[in-house]
Amino acid sequence: MGSREQQYGGLDGFRIVAAILVIAIHTSPLLSYSELADFTFTRILARVAVPFFFMCTGFFMLPRIGPDTRKNREVLWPFLWKVGTLYLFSIALYIPVNVYAGYFANGFSVLSFLKDLVFNGTLYHLWYFPGIMLGGWISCQLYARLSAKKAFVVAGMLYAIGLFGDSYYGIAQMSPVVDSIYQSMFHLFDYTRNGIFFAPVFIVMGGVIAASRGSEKLVRRGDNESIRHGGNVSHGDNESISNNGRVRRAKNNVRRDRHRILAFASGFVMCLCLLAAEALLLHASHLQRHDSMYLFLLPCMYFLFQLLLCVRGRSMPAVRKLCLYVYIIHPLCIVLIRAAGKVTGLSSMIVENSLIHFVLVTALAFAVSAMWLALAKRNRDKPKPTGRAWAEIHLPNLLHNLRECQRVLPVRSEVMAVVKAQAYGHGGWQIAQALSQAGIKRFAVATMEEGIELRKKGVKGEILILGYTHESNVRQLARYKLTQTVVDAEYAETLNACRVRVQVQIKIDTGMGRLGESYANIDRIVSMYRCPYLQVGGTFTHLCVADRLEKTDVAYTESQIAHFHEVIEYLRAQGIDPGKLHVQSSYGMLNYSGLHYDYARIGIALYGMLSSADDTVMTGVELRPVLSLKARVAHVKQADKGSTVGYGRSYTVERDSKIAIISIGYADGIPRMLSQAGASCLIRGSRAPLIGSVCMDQLMVDVTHIADVGQGDVATLIGSDQDECITATTLAKQCGTITNELVSRIGERVKRVYIRE
Ligand SMILES: *Cc1c(COP(=O)(O)O)cnc(C)c1O
């Protein structure tokens, strides 16, 4: 299953076209030659640009909107925040231009500024930002409350109201009542082309298209799944049958795709012609007040977007940014080219010739944006402590895994991010901050110190300490608003006796045999809820064989869940509120996704790994590893046949060899016996086997077969290098352990480098 983000090359490519069209709208390239041609190009055809950007937003955002308002907020707020900051930046950027144009002189008031801020934009192109924020907000509200179809109908009605204030205004004017309504609306905003009447229909349409694709994919994935299951019943022959089936299906898909492309392309061309006819007619009959909104723009955009989705190709996140920057700065480029014209006396050529003007503005806007992009990237890349040994933590993959978990969990089940042990070696507060920004509000740590560290780094929300905290620290618990796990009834009493109000959650042992009051001791459990100083916010238990799918293990897990339920039911019958309930950790989620609890405590899955290479799980999640582990080649030497390498002369060189010393060792978390397990690392895209024992600070590899290995080269212990890849799961298997242990033991000397893009 190809990763989702690799498939939107068509959309990203068209962003460039759309950005150029926007520049055309603002420079009228054909005006020097023919007014009609320019109108047709910039006021009709180029009008696809902005709706296209709206649809992209809807396409990627709305599928994450559902009935749960809390989850929706986690989608909507980061979006509004991101666009909002860009908007503020843009406003500030254009203040000099505003001053020059007399914006603050002519009838400027707080009210007019507010109107511009919310609807019109403080410069002509900036309406887009409040437009997409307002439109995005409205669309999410509609989408959360109505079916996709109804949301589209409501957004369509808003669009219809907008139409009569835009290119159909002449018709609205025919009725004095309607006209007066529109007149009063125009006190509030200059155009109906805004976040209320224009944007929502396109944003919702993007969401509808995404939803329709989603269900289609499920169907396709569904038939693959059943084939695989068929193959599992008896191996051998069935395998080849299923392969044939797959080939046939692939061929069918190609044929289906070709039909789709043809249908969408002809639909698009037809609607574009109808759009042109509609617009020219309205223009000729002088009905237009403005020329952004047309009836046929809707089907036109639908077909265009579907067509672009058929274009295969890698997504290009850099292009996305580039086009955004072009959008923001092109008016500045117009000003600059004009100024250059004046200064050089070349105005007649570079400004008055509309086509040359357009080309120059476009070139300048793209050049400046590319520079901006490069500069931003360089600044981001600056502090890379990658001198000796380091771990690259790829945050976009973390967020991807988060979304995958949220997709698998029932709507009302929240992810409680388990960030104990420095987030399994990924860096505790850094991971918590990144997840916090993505809307996560529940965290779990192992110790009080870990919890305090998160608070000191500004992490908000609930922080549950899963482990034991001695009662002498009770004031710290209260001060940092940490939630303590009550590990048994005695502990509840001890903690309560401190007479400090603390937040707690009660842990029930349902068969794990670790922390928690045993489910059998129901009276002791009840007593835990009756401690006046303990504010019980939740009750939980931990599963111990949720990772296994054998019958007896499933039965055991089910008995654990049943015991938990008995306890909860009993408490409720006694009038005790057990608070939030949670049972599952990663494997609990992956294998028992049907369970409905308030939280799921997710650790290893967030970091993009299963615990062990041999595990299969019941849910189709696509997890991406977050961590790569790298170190430098410190030294390269020749070793003659028969010589030995390392402590204890444990390795004898069998032929004349080239040996590289890598600057990472067991103090950095590489198990000492790893070389005996046939492990290797990657250098220059090739596998270099470990030889001798791993030392405290170094290890040795054989690089005889790899050309040009030199001091300072990068050796990858976990991660990929060109076409080769070593996963933490493989490495963990070689060390005879699970990934959880391997990554959480990566040492403090290994600098964590956070990759945000
Ligand atoms: C560590 C831990 C988790 C997280 O487990 P994963 O398998 O990494 O998801 C959940 N609950 C408790 C009590 C834990 O100790």
Image (cartoon, helix red, strand yellow):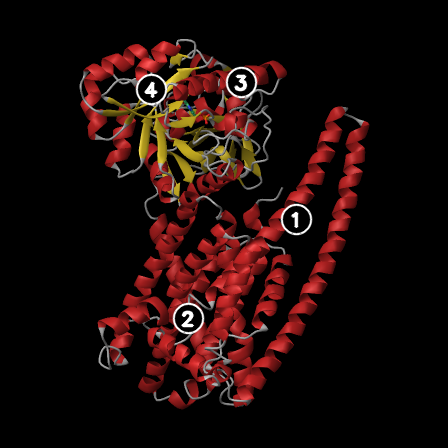
Give the residue drawn at x 37%, y 62%: 372
Q: CA distance from mark 3 to mark 1?
A: 34 Å
Where residue 374 appears, as percent x and y from the top left, is 40, 58
Task: Give the vertical position of 42 relative to 299 (above or below).
Answer: below
Q: Quadrant of the N terminus?
A: top right
Q: CA distance from mark 3 to mark 2?
A: 60 Å
| Residue for badge 1 | 216
| Residue for badge 3 | 557
Where residue 263 appears, as percent x and y from the top left, is 71, 64
On residue 467, the disc is 4
Q: What amino acid is labelled 3 in the image? A: Thr
| Residue for badge 2 | 365
SS under mark 1: helix
Q: Respond yes or no on whether mark 2 lies under 8 Å from ligand 1.
A: no
Q: Residues within 10 Å of mark 1 (few under 14, many from 20)?
A: few
Which numbered mark, 3 or 4, is in the foreground of this view? 3
Q: Earlier in the sequence, mark 3 or mark 4?
A: 4
Which numbered mark, 2 or 1, is in the foreground of this view? 1
Q: CA distance from mark 4 to mark 2?
A: 56 Å
Q: Residues within 10 Å of mark 2 (few under 14, many from 20)?
A: many
For ligand 1, the image quadrant comes to top left
Q: Residues within 10 Å of mark 3 (few under 14, many from 20)?
A: many
- In the displayed structure image, the side of residue 242 where residue 383 appears, left or right: left
Task: Give the vertical position of 551 relative to 628 (above or below).
Answer: above
Q: What amino acid is labelled 1 in the image? A: Glu
Q: CA distance from mark 2 to mark 1?
A: 39 Å
